[in-house]
């Protein structure tokens, strides 16, 4: 019975989310589901922000297979008809996607479902749907996302990926210990452990006090790292623990001596030699899902955006 009440709460909360928050929630769930290189697309004609990303797998021969997914976020109360899906399908085809995923707080209509099935029997872009009941299952598995957006009244009944967090922190701690033992520099790793622990502690405090994740503004004079430029960092729109964790992860994973930032319409942009190591880094993904921050990766550029 308890699980039923939680799921009902999640569905009700999803339908009450503002469109932008629903899009952000979709981003978090996709990231935790293994989608790589997630990026926002130019706002559509309906004003919504949609996503694209890559799903990477290895086939039986050992070859890497990369599928390009277009993701449409639809916070609807009524069933979605085929004309709506077909319009999105046309965009996905024009951009050479392999899959179109429709994430919605409702479901597709029966005639639309039949049209999707007929379409998928032919070659071309395949259509997939995450209706409200599948989305609520994912949010039960990835409980921190449901908590982050205040979708449940009793977060203790949800599963939160603390095992994944502990695993990553344990690997980092072991690497730090080995670095110390062999006389290598360990300060960056110690800093990363500290800021990540701070991030998780703040999220636990948020849930206890507010029932959801809350933004605690970055204070430039207090929160700027000495290796981050410019100093103080003009980033008072960001959540402090989220930004500090993101910056420390970037510095550690990419092995930078300093992190040079520039501002662009309230975002922080960091130019590096390559962002490749960040694309599949588990800690960097966890910063996004437990933090109040978005990131976008180009080949040599990282853009951080406050939520």
Image: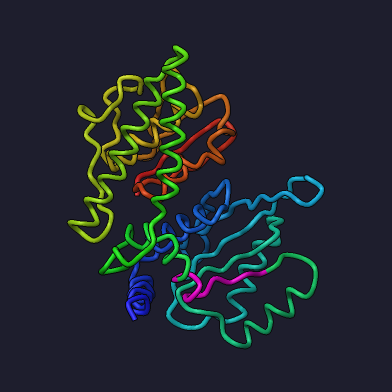
Q: Is residue 95 left or right of residue 223?
A: right
Which of the image's four quarters has the N terminus?
A: bottom left
* Chosen colour scheme: rainbow
Q: Residue placed at 29% from the left, 63% from the top? A: 156
Q: Is residue 123 left or right of residue 154?
A: right
| Coordinates of residue 200 in the picture (x, y in percent) | 31, 45
| Coordinates of residue 184 in the picture (x, y in percent) | 45, 14
Q: Residue placed at 74% from the left, 46% from the top? A: 64
Q: Is residue 134 magenta?
A: yes
Q: Residue placed at 80% from the left, 68% from the top? A: 123
Q: Residue placed at 34% from the left, 49% from the top? A: 307
Q: Residue furthest left?
A: 209
| Coordinates of residue 43 in the picture (x, y in percent) | 50, 57
Q: Residue furthest front?
A: 181
Highlighted magenta segment, given as a residue range = 127-136
Q: Nearer the viewer, residue 163 or 104?
A: 163
Vertical placement of residue 157 versus 58, above or below? below
Q: Is residue 292 magenta?
A: no
Q: Residue furthest bottom?
A: 110
Q: Nearer the viewer, residue 14 or 74?
A: 14
Q: Quadrant of residue 181?
A: top left
| Coordinates of residue 28 in the picture (x, y in percent) | 45, 55
Q: Nearer the viewer, residue 94 or 135?
A: 135
Q: Quadrant of residue 231?
A: top left
Q: Nearer the viewer, residue 110 or 7?
A: 7
Vertical placement of residue 62 versus 89, above or below? above
Vertical placement of residue 267 versus 162, above or below? above
Count every numbered label the image shows and give the total: 0
Q: Is residue 188 left or right of residue 253?
A: left
């Amino acid at each position: 019975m308890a699980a039923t009440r939680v799921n009902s709460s999640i569905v009700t909360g999803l339908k009450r989310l503002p469109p932008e928050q629903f899009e952000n929630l979709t981003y978090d769930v996709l990231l935790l589901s293994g989608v790589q290189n997630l990026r926002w697309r130019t706002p559509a004609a309906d004003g919504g922000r949609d996503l694209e990303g890559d799903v990477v797998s290895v086939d039986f021969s050992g070859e890497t297979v990369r599928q390009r997914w277009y993701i449409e976020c639809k916070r609807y109360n009524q069933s979605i008809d085929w004309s709506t899906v077909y319009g999105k399908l046309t965009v996905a085809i024009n951009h050479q996607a392999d899959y179109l995923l429709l994430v919605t707080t409702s479901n597709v209509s029966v005639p639309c479902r039949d049209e999707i099935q007929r379409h998928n029997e032919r070659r071309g872009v395949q259509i997939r749907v995450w209706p409200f009941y599948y989305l609520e299952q994912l949010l039960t598995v990835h409980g921190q996302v449901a908590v982050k957006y205040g979708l449940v009244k009793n977060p203790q009944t949800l599963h939160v990926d603390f095992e994944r967090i502990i695993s990553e922190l344990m690997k980092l701690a072991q690497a730090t210990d080995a670095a110390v033992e062999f006389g290598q520099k360990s300060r960056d790793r110690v800093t990363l452990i500290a800021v990540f622990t701070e991030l998780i502690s703040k999220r636990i405090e948020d849930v206890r006090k507010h029932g959801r994740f809350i933004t605690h503004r970055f204070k430039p004079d207090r929160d700027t790292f000495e290796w981050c430029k410019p100093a103080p960092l003009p980033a008072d729109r960001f959540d402090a623990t989220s930004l500090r964790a993101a910056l420390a992860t970037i510095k550690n994973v990419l092995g930078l001596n300093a992190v040079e930032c520039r501002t662009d319409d309230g975002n922080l942009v960091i130019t590096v030699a390559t962002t490749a190591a960040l694309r599949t880094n588990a800690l960097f993904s966890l910063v996004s899902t437990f933090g109040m921050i978005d990131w976008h990766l180009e080949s040599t550029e990282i853009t951080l955006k406050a939520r």
